[in-house]
Image (cartoon, rainbow, N blue to C red):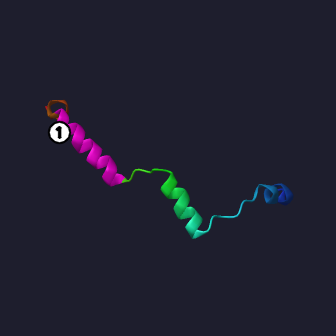
Amino acid sequence: MINFDEELKKYKPSLEVDQAEEAIQRNDLRDVVDIVEEMMQEVRRDPKRFRQV
């Protein structure tokens, strides 16, 4: 059974949009484009490693 008093103690209000944006930007998150660019650099450095057999 849910203990509402305990759940209320755990409650933290959600961030406002501006605060959430700042938190996201501080976390140097990589997006898909960053990952693909890194993969392409690896292929260019060592193409034999990624060659299909």
The location of residue 21, given as percent across then percent down, is: 52, 63
Examine the rendered structure and indicate whether residue 7 appears above or below residue 37. Answer: below
Q: Quadrant of residue 45?
A: top left
Q: Nearer the viewer, residue 27 or 48?
A: 27
Q: Quadrant of residue 48?
A: top left
Name the quadrant of the N terminus.
bottom right
Q: Helix, strand or loop at disc 1?
A: helix
Single out the residue that lies furthest toward the bottom. 17
Position of 35 with respect to 14 (left or right) is left
**Residue occupying image coordinates x 77% and y 55%:** 10
Q: Nearer the viewer, residue 34 or 2?
A: 34
Examine the rendered structure and indicate whether residue 28 appears above or below residue 46. Answer: below
Position of 21 with respect to 16 (left or right) is left
Q: Main secondary structure of the magenta part?
A: helix
Provide the residue designation for mark 1: 44
Position of 53 with respect to 4 (left or right) is left
Q: Quadrant of residue 19?
A: bottom right
Q: Nearer the viewer, residue 7 or 28?
A: 28
**Residue occupying image coordinates x 83% and y 54%:** 6
Crowding near the residue tagged with mark 1, few <14, some 14–19, many ≥20 C-alpha atoms within 10 Å: few
Examine the rendered structure and indicate whether residue 5 appears above or below residue 17. Answer: above
Q: Is 48 in the magenta?
A: no
| Chain part drawn in magenta | 32-46
Examine the rendered structure and indicate whether residue 45 appears above or below residue 17. Answer: above
Position of 8 with respect to 34 (left or right) is right
**Residue occupying image coordinates x 28% and y 48%:** 36
The location of residue 4, given as percent across then percent down, is: 83, 60
How many numbered discs sit on the rendered protein?
A: 1
The location of residue 33, given as percent across then percent down, is: 31, 54
Amino acid type of the residue tagged 1 in the rendering: Arg
**Residue occupying image coordinates x 81% and y 56%:** 9
Name the quadrant of the C terminus.
top left
